[in-house]
Amino acid sequence: MLRAAVATLAAVLLVVSLAASPAVAAAGADRLQTPDRFDTTTFRVTLYENGSATWTMAHYQPLETENETDQFRAYATDFENNETGLYSDFVADAEALTTTGTEKTGRQMDASNFQRSAGVEPGQNRGAVRMSFLWTNFARTYAERVVVSDVFDDGFYLGAGQRMVFEHDTSMVFTAARPTPASRSDPDSLQASGSITYAGERSFTSSRPYVELAQPDTPGTATPNVTNASATPGETMWQLALVLAVLALGVVAAAAWRSGAAGAVLGGDDGGTAAESVSEPTPDTAVEESALLDDDDRVIKLLEENGGRMKQVDIVETTEWSKSKVSMLLSDMEENGDISKLRVGRENIISLAGEEPDAAGSPFDEE
């Protein structure tokens, strides 16, 4: 597990928990504190469509007197104008973090575009120190999605007084955030939010936080309701009748699939009904959204949401596909290098590329 060295001011930026080398892992949780002269820390992750992200760490110090304010101004000037140990340690930690990330995920990660600033924030009675860098290939990218999860392979910890803010500089929208954020910029809508925030003190499990961006017009994302203000009453009634007719046809078609009538005509997987080869709607919005993805994308998303690995039988149960369909799909995906299958006893363990279990025993034995 990789948690950045945070003994000094700079290192608190790198609290990300990647699977780390023993030397870095040995740093321990005592290094994840906000330095004594500061009372709060904010980690701000700005995501881009190419999977890269700007990581910015900000420490804040309350300034209650003129003397404290003057002292902090002097400190800020020295920090910005001189190559302090604080900043050089920050650069070294960022480069070590991305090197380990490359080894863990298989994506080439680099740290670049380092910046720093410090000063007294006008009207807020506090001083701030900020350091940032561009983390190349921080997130996974797909055709129309950006997913943050595997960099938190061993979980993540936010200390008391610490916050992590995810925002994006893209045409995409937030489509998933797990666990539920402490706050978001639009309380009524995740997709309308420009940022989401997690607050400490709290510990996250493996591959969490999980944050997903997607294009607004992709399946599973909301699109605004548009009313045709120029439509006449007659046009509106005609449109309503058309919609009702389509819905009625949909109900009849669904009934035919579920009764097996359509399956008898078209044939189904394993001699069953054709309904077994498609996902039936459920009240769960997440399941409805997943069902609109391509089959291989849905499997990848399921694996991402379950820490990179699942039993094959659990994939069958979750998707409600037939065993033979799942088996054929997984074989194709393994041949394409998207996943790997490991036979353990009488069951198959399905893993994302790079998430294979280290030992021959089932990674689920202790669950």
Image (tube, helix red, strand yellow):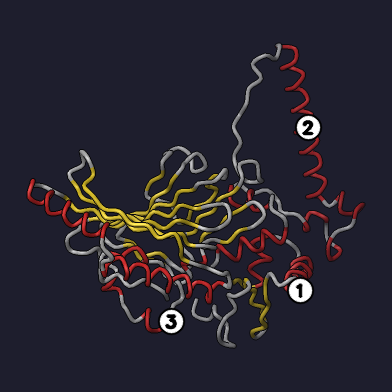
Q: Determine the CA span between mark 1 and mark 2.
A: 40 Å
Q: Which residue is mark 1?
A: 335
Which label's residue is closer to the chain start, 1 or 2?
A: 2
Residue contact at pointers 2 and 3, CB within 8 angstroms: no
Q: Amino acid at mark 1?
A: Glu
Question: Looking at the image, can residue 265 be seen?
Answer: yes
- In the picture, measured across the screen, residue 203 lies left or right of residue 140, that is left
Vertical placement of 22 versus 162: above or below? below
Residue at 70% x, 15% y: name it.
231
Q: How many numbered marks have been drawn onto this rendered protein structure?
A: 3
Residue closest to the eye, 64 or 326 = 64
Residue closest to the eye, 287 or 211 = 211
Residue at 19% x, 53% y: name it.
61
Q: Determine the CA span between mark 2 and mark 3.
A: 58 Å
Q: Which label sits on residue 207?
A: none
CA neighbours of label 1 inside 10 A, class few (<14), some (14 to 19), many (20+): few
Q: Which residue is mark 2?
A: 246
Vertical placement of 331 versus 225: above or below? below
Disc 3 secondary structure class: loop
Vertical placement of 237 versus 248: above or below? above
Q: Residue furthest front?
A: 81
Q: Amino acid at mark 2?
A: Val
Disc 1 secondary structure class: helix
Residue contact at pointers 1 and 2, CB within 8 angstroms: no
Q: Quadrant of residue 23?
A: bottom left
Q: Which residue is mark 3?
A: 21
Residue 301 screen position, x and y as percent = 61, 60
Residue 232 screen position, x and y as percent = 71, 11
Q: Amino acid at mark 3?
A: Ser
